[in-house]
Image (cartoon, grey):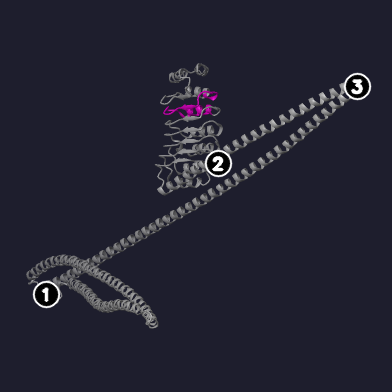
Amino acid sequence: MDELRRMYVRICQEKGSEPQDAVLRELQEHREASARVRLDLSTQILSLESCQVLGLLLENDVTFTDVILSDCMLSEEGAKLILQGLRSNSVVKHLNMKGNNLRGDSAEALGKLLRQNSSITSLILEWNNLGMWEEGFSMFCDGLGSNQTLQNLDLRNNQINHKGGEELSATLKRNFTLQELDLRWNNIGLLGGRTILNCLQNNRSIRKLELSGNNIPSDILKAIEQGVDHNQDRQTVRKDHVDQRQILTKEVQNLKQEKNKQFLDLMGTIDRHKEEMSRSNRTTTLQINKLQETLEDRKSVVNSLTAKLHMSDAALALSQQKAQDLELILTQTKRDSANLREQLVKELRKEKEDFATRELRLRQELAASNEKILVYRSKVEELERKCSGQQEQLFELKQELTNTSAELKLRAIQAEERLEAEKKRFRQAQDEANILRQKELEHMTRHLEDNERAAQERVQRIDATKIALEEELNRMKMTLANERAQTEEEIQKARSAAQQEAQQHSAVLQDKIRTLTQSRDQTQAQVLQQKQIAGELQAQNNQLGLEIEGLKRRIDGLQQEISRKDQERLTEVTKVRVELQEQIGHLEAELATQEGLKERISAMERQQKAQANTHRETLLDKDSEISSLMEKLRLKDAEILRMRDQEAQRASLLQSAVLNYISTPLGSPGGRT
């Protein structure tokens, strides 16, 4: 660790910068704790020069596996220098760059790091701004798609929108090593959630995917969770298969090793026997040579030598027999090894078949899950259709509101035009009155100069009457407006009262109809129950009739037997007669009970008929009440219409009177005075 510290100081001297105390302190702590393999510079403000030196230090470092640079307030250039140094590093596995406000250039540098580095398995980028620049984030996603070692990626609070979600989903379709992805508290939205859900159909490696706080609907979140759960199940199944394969391969290897050992042992024993045979052959040859030499010298010992030769021949025969036995043992071992191989091949075939069946089951489960996904998609489409229908209804309602507002404006404009026409008529009447007044004044000045005073007084009177008439006009207008408002209020009150009465009457009628239907259902149920009871009683009656017929047949048989055996067993006949009389009494009692049941059945039928008649009468009464109520409603509607007609006539009469009053000139004989 002193070497790292010295290297850091040397690189700082080469670059002309001063070593940073926080970095030296961390390297010193790392030197004191030799077991640590983590470089923790979190919450330390690193300058650009220190970032450059750290990038050069980490470029060829082989000690640190965890690098923590969280909340270091790194600049864009500093982050790029550190990430550039980590590209060629082959030891760092965990990199934490949380809360450094990384943006577009840093995102591009991260993409290059992921494309070139092959050792980092965990990358934490929480609380940055990688998603704000689309080009930089697309470069980051391209690097992530080409990476084959990263397993855990944390992108919380990175301002990722729906386009960033689409980029991530496209990379997930190419990346099959990433297992955990945290995208909480971004702004992926509905579109990004759908793209991520679609990419899960191609990606089978993700086991954990966090998406809370992204404005994604709950149904899409549930579908994504189901897809991640399916991936987890698939990976567990794959792990189980891999473990089983490894166990089976180990067992097969062990068996092969044992068989090889046994074969080698057999070959060793065979070699030993061959060596012994060669030794024995050598000894025999030596003995034969000696015997041949002694034959020339000692002819007297030929018999003994021949005997020894016979003994040696016997030994040779025995050795040959042993060799044959060994050959038989070899053949048997070869057969056993062949049988073992066949058994192993069969077991492997069985395992392959089991594996194929499991794969078929998994595929069936996948097909079922895909069908469920299609069902969920159809439900989502139906919901979207419903939403579109509701939006169309809202649009239609808005159009109706605009139409009604336009109609109201037209009516207001028409009313203003009418008022202006009435004002014009009034002005014309005033002008005509003024013209007549001037003519009369001229005529009176010409012909009646003496009556000027009278004319002036008359003019004053006419002015007074004009003022009075104008006041009366205003009063009449006010009274007409008040009467119109009162009549409209009375009409609305009458309408509301009639509607309330109609609703109350309809509710009462509906309640009565419900009660009648309930009573009818109850009576029908009672009738059905009574019919069932009557059917049961009839069945019992039939059974009793059958029993009576059987008993009568028995009585006939017994009487025949009695006629045959009167002479032999008189005592038995008397006993049988007594028993028969008792049975007859029981039968008569049963017949009496049957008659009582028949009477009850007839009484029940009468009650049913009476109840049916009463029910019919009540139904007729209710129908008559309903008809009377309907007639009352009709009469009320007629009265309301009549009142409306009367009010309309009154309003028309008032309007005609006002118009006549306004249209009559002041000087006319039948007009205003």
Which of the labelled discs sits on residue 241, or is there none? 2
Amino acid identity at mark 3: Ser
Q: In the displayed structure, does residue 285 sit left or right of residue 672?
A: right
Quadrant containing the C terminus is bottom left
Q: Amino acid at mark 1?
A: His
Q: How many marks?
A: 3
217 relative to 633, above or below:
above
Q: Are marks 3 and 2 in contact (CB under 8 Å)?
A: no
**Residue sticking out furthest to the bottom:** 563
Mark before the other along the chain sequence, 3 or 2: 2
Q: Is the residue under label 1 in contact with that under label 2 (CB below 8 Å)?
A: no
| CA gap, disc 2 and disc 1 | 135 Å
Q: Which mark is residue 447?
A: 1
Q: How many neighbours does mark 2 have within 10 angstroms: few (below 14), some (14-19), or many (20 or more)? A: some
Residue 300, which numbered label?
3
Q: Amino acid at mark 2?
A: His
Span shown in magenta? 58-86
